[in-house]
Image (cartoon, rainbow, N blue to C red):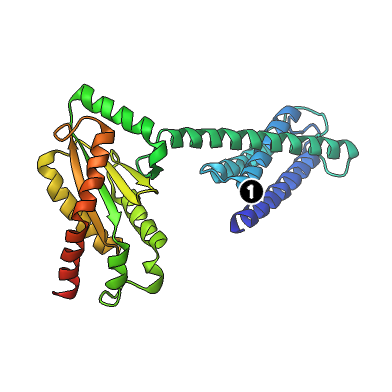
Amino acid sequence: MKRIVDYFLGFILFEYIYFHVNQLLIRYSPKFSFHPVLELILLIILISTVFLSLRKPIKLEKLIFRWLLFYFIFIGIFSIWSSEPSLLEWGRLFDIVILIFVIIVAYKFSQELVNYDNQIQNLDQDRLSPNTIIPLEKSEAFVQAEFIRAKRYNYPITLIALRPLNELSKTSGSHIHFFNRSSYHPENINKRIGKFLSNKTRTSDQVIFSKEENVFLLICPELTPETAQDFVDRLKFRVLNEAKSFVDLNYVCFPKEGIMFDALYKKLLRGISENRAIGVEEYSTVVHGK
């Protein structure tokens, strides 16, 4: 709402300056007039920025608006090009028709810019931004491309699986001050873990989520088997302290433990299932002191 008010007041200020500078210069210089074509082009751009600010704000719109404002003042003070009357003097029927036409063109122009901006964003999403969590069923293209690069350039990949321990979070809630009743819901736990992984992972990593298995999969290129265990231990600690969630983790390394993604993923899930009871027992020892 504040942005809309700012642009509305700015537009009123522009019209005030435009009208009075125009009238003042016409009074002292009868031959003065804005160049009609330039007038139309700049006004179309100006109104387009206003429409853009209301529909889909862009970073440079305020800068463009201010530049146009001062540019019109500059034109009004220093430009004397023809003796023809200005096309946009308020109060004339022809001027009103021209103004409506300019508004329509500006609106269409702003729509095209918005569509172009949407296309750019869609392309960025198709490239799978490292901070975007993607569903497992839509990750096939990325995974294949990553494994092909790893084989071609001979670098390792570590796959880390994180499964939230929702039941343990519930039973431990009374012992840890940051757990509250709403935090026990599995959806809220997944949101916290997903947000943590999105913000804290490296730009080269990719986070994938399997809704069916309720597992987060972290693909870490160039993470070697020698450093993977230390990385997983630190990751478990940070998830507990920053995401306020208990998780069971397992990892496998490519190509040391397999060369096919499907086989590595199944091995990850088996490891989590086998170690689940051990993981719960370890967490219970830490939390309850048993």
Quarter of the figure with residue 124: top left
Q: Position of residue 254 (x, y in %)?
A: 19, 34
Quarter of the figure with residue 157: top left
Q: Residue furthest top?
A: 152
Quadrant where the N terminus is found in the figure: bottom right
Q: Position of residue 237 (x, y in %)?
A: 20, 59
Asked whether residue 220 appears in the rendered view, the answer is no
Left or right: where 25 falls relative to 141? right
Viewer-side residue, 65 vs 213: 213
Q: Is residue 130 above or below residue 255?
A: below
Image point 27% across, 25% down: which residue?
Answer: 148
Left or right: where 104 falls relative to 55? right
- Residue placed under numbered mark 1 in the picture: 54
Q: Residue furthest right?
A: 93
Asked whether residue 11 appears in the rendered view, the answer is yes
Amino acid at the residue labelled 1: Leu
Determine the secondary structure under disc 1: helix
